[in-house]
Image (cartoon, rainbow, N blue to C red):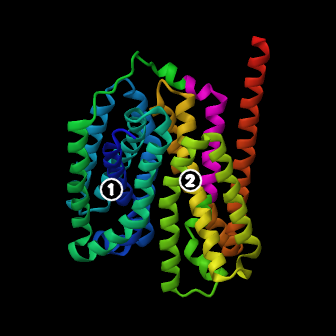
Amino acid sequence: MKNRMLVYILALAVFLIGTIEYIITGIIQMVSSDLHVSTSSTGLLVTTFALSSAIGAPIIIALTINVDRKKLLLSMLLVFIASTFLSFSSFSYEMMLFTRVLQGVSGGIVTVVAMAVATRLVEKDKRGNAIGIILMGLSSSLVLGVPIGTFLSSIIGWRGLFIAAGVLTLIPFIFVFKNVPSIKEKESITIGKQLSVLKNKKVVITVIITLFYISGYSTLFTYLTPFLQGQSNLVIAEISGVLLLAGISSFLGSRVGGLTVDKKGPKFTIFIGLLLQAIMLLLLSLIGGLLSLVGFIAVIMIWMLATWGTSPAQQLYLVTQVPRSPDIGISVNTSFIQFGFALGSALGGYVINISSVLNLGWMGLGFVILALLMATILFAFERASKDLANSNTK
């Protein structure tokens, strides 16, 4: 794959952005105490980042679609770096909320544009691999970024952690500045043309699939620790080990998904990924408590691998549907990922309040089955359209 080093550098940028997004969960007590607010209010710093990314990023990407992607990527990296330094001097809760908005919008744009740029830097048959590497940067922020960041915060403080992330982000900034070529659309794309993307039924169904399966993932993963405690006799130290293995599986899933989509195509990868998710959630819900410890952990790992392995295929499928403006397709899908996280975690909390944490698997399974049904409809519709087109040419 050509420009492999550049793709990994873009993945580093996404890794740092993901770490800053999720790190609040690891340092929540430090931030809460320092800003003199409740833990629940501090938790809103995570929500603020996610919603800013989900809403702000696609709007700005749409408005700047004719801007050189290199210039947009560099400017948003600068905004993200500036926001991390601003966090260092944010001594009020309101100011910290403002910096999280800046981080969410700029980070969301960098993530989307990095994937779009990566697909243009590599060979056509390596685009799925490139997207997988970028998403591997995001998943590794959960595996490595959050635990390492949490540890470092105890040494340099949570504010120093943001500064460190900002300084490290200078590395991808410099690499992009020196090595990424100018990337502009060959012809001007109006807002009307961009909105027409949403008239494409296949695009709409695809992002709905994303919303459903990510909601199913978030429903259980957000509360995975109490779920593990309810389904097994694991102690906290053992649960930490399971979470580490789950994180490694998400990391590998992004990589395996990217390689599979290049070899087998997006539709195959999406369908198999969703099917594996459904089977694993069914096993966890139906016989999770009866499985051996090794079997239980294996099911968790396969579920994580299948979930993260589906994402590169979803992103690439959208790129193929809107080849003239892949940024738009990827940004819309990324927004629905963020909405899925918010919806799943909210409904998961509701399930716990009205019933039991052990029922989270059933809720997640319901979402994934909906995604699987939508995927079946999408691919059947596509096949029917191709058959009709072939019959008309005969």
Are discs 1 and 2 less than 8 Å apart at CB? no
Residue to which mark 2 is pinned: 309
At x 53%, y 57%, the residue is 253
**Magenta span contains residue 394:** no
Query: Quadrant location of the C terminus?
Result: top right
Residue 297 in picture, x, y percent from top left: 60, 75
Residue to which mark 1 is pinned: 16
- Which of these two is toward me, 74 or 248? 248
Q: Helix, strand or loop at disc 1?
A: helix
Of discs 1 and 2, which sits in the foreground? 2
Q: CA distance from mark 1 to mark 2?
A: 21 Å
At x 57%, y 70%, the residue is 223
User: Can residue 347 be seen at all in this image of the molecule?
Assistant: yes
- Mark 1, other Cα within 10 Å: few <14 / some 14–19 / many ≥20: many
Q: Helix, strand or loop at disc 2?
A: helix
In the image, taking residue 248 as reference, residue 99 lies left or right, namely left
At x 31%, y 46%, the residue is 5
**Magenta span contains residue 210:** yes
337 w.r.t. 151: above or below: above
Please tell me which of labels 1 and 2 falls first in the chain. Answer: 1
Q: Which residues are magenta?
A: 196-216
User: Can residue 48 be seen at all in this image of the molecule?
Assistant: no
- Which of these two is toward me, 277 or 190? 277
Inspect the image, locate mark 2, and give the three-letter code of the amino acid beneath it: Gly
